[in-house]
Image: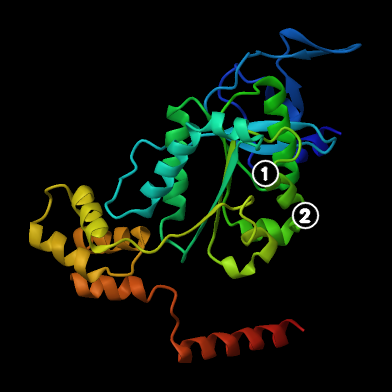
């Protein structure tokens, strides 16, 4: 029973570092409750640990046990060192979200559910995750809650749980690679989540995908689900220059900064970071560094043929 329950906590569960958490793992991998007070529900009395009237502002993963009980798993996320870049479409998205939070009375006057859905799409590495992290920083600063969603079932249960305890708390629901969620769970429960079923109110949904064509039309083409569909492209020249300048910060001449920014056109921030490492740390010429990064993962066709031949030989030997 203990083993099954631990499995239900999910692979991301880690043992808390302090005694402030109610759930911890004891000897022999058995689940223990740090009980110090009683939790009462009807005729049921349960020992529980430290209690709180409000959920601490931060980022949480929506989880659900095998018995259907929802819980929130706090995530350690660093959002302090993000670099804000010029010409960044993220800023437009964040400005819209800020504007949305100030219009609750307008939604109430019309009798509409106070929610908003935003879908960000674009090539891998274009900055969609950076948008997510900047949004996390914004919602934490506003004493709100960011929820990471991998399962729409868990999301609905966790949002309902939060709304029972804190009906007015600002929530941002984050669904990275939403096409994978649709593939794993189908789109029916996801549409229920986006439509605001149950206590889903005062919520902003943010979803990302590299493959918008994989999403069913009823997700994309109905405004009440994703009201804004925003393309996030690779960083502009101005954005690349600011990133390189911020990272190097006087360590090299302005001409080197300009050259790296110019030569990394259509590269992601992660790729530009690798170019900087090759140039500054390993003393590789800028053009060669860019070429290396652009060809990462590219295998020579003759080498690929030799690898396949070797694989077949191994399989025949094992038989």
* Of 129 and 306, the residue lying toward us: 129
Residue 214's disc number: none
Residue most toward the front? 109
The crowding category of the residue bearing disc 2, from other C-alpha atoms within 10 Å (few below 14, some 14 to 19, many at least 20), is: few
Q: Position of residue 303 (x, y in %)?
A: 47, 87
In the picture shown, does residue 54 fall above or below 77? above
The crowding category of the residue bearing disc 1, from other C-alpha atoms within 10 Å (few below 14, some 14 to 19, many at least 20), is: few
Label 2 vs label 1, nearer the camera: 2
Query: For the C terminus, which image quadrant?
Result: bottom right
Q: Position of residue 224 (x, y in %)?
A: 63, 50
- For image coordinates 69% across by 36% down, the residue present is 200
- For image coordinates 37% across by 59% down, the residue present is 270
Q: Position of residue 300 (x, y in %)?
A: 43, 86
Q: Is residue 97 visible?
A: yes
- Does the residue at mark 2 contact the one at mark 1 (Cβ under 8 Å)? no
In the picture shown, does residue 201 fall above or below 83? above
What residue is shown with label 1?
A: 11
Q: Quadrant of residue 164?
A: top right
What residue is shown with label 2?
A: 188
Task: Report, in whole angstroms, how far the alpha carbon at label 2 lies from the one at label 1.
Answer: 26 Å
Name the colour scheme.
Answer: rainbow
- For image coordinates 47% across by 31% down, the residue present is 102
Q: Quadrant of residue 74?
A: top right
Query: For the N terminus, which image quadrant?
Result: top right
In the picture shown, does residue 272 fall above or below 159? below
């Amino acid at each position: 029973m203990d083993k099954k329950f631990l499995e239900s906590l999910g692979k991301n569960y880690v043992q808390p570092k302090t005694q402030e958490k109610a759930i911890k793992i004891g000897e022999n991998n058995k689940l223990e409750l740090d009980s110090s007070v009683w939790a009462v529900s009807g005729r049921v009395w349960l020992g529980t640990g430290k209690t709180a009237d409000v959920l601490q502002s931060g980022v949480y993963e929506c989880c659900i046990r095998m018995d259907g009980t929802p819980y929130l798993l706090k995530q350690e996320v660093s959002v302090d060192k993000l670099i804000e870049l010029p010409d960044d479409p993220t800023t437009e998205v964040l400005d819209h979200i800020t504007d949305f939070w100030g219009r609750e009375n307008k939604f109430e006057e019309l009798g509409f559910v106070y929610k908003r859905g935003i879908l960000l799409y674009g090539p891998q590495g274009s900055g969609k995750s950076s948008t997510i992290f900047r949004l996390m920083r914004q919602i934490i600063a506003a004493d709100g809650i960011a929820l990471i969603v991998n399962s729409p079932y868990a999301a609905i249960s966790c949002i309902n749980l939060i709304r029972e305890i804190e009906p007015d708390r600002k929530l941002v629901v984050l669904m990275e690679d939403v096409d994978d969620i649709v593939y794993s769970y189908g789109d029916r429960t996801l549409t229920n989540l986006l439509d605001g079923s149950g206590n889903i109110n005062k919520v902003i949904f943010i979803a990302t995908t590299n493959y918008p064509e994989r999403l069913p039309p009823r997700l994309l083409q109905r405004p009440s689900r994703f009201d804004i569909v925003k393309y996030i492209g690779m960083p502009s020249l101005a954005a690349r220059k600011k990133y390189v300048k911020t990272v190097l910060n006087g360590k090299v001449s302005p001409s080197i900064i300009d050259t790296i920014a110019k030569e990394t056109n259509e590269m992601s921030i992660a790729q530009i970071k690798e170019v900087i490492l090759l140039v500054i740390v390993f003393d590789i010429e800028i053009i060669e560094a860019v070429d290396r990064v652009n060809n990462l993962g590219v295998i020579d066709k003759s080498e690929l043929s030799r690898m396949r031949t070797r694989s077949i030989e191994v399989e025949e030997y094992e038989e």
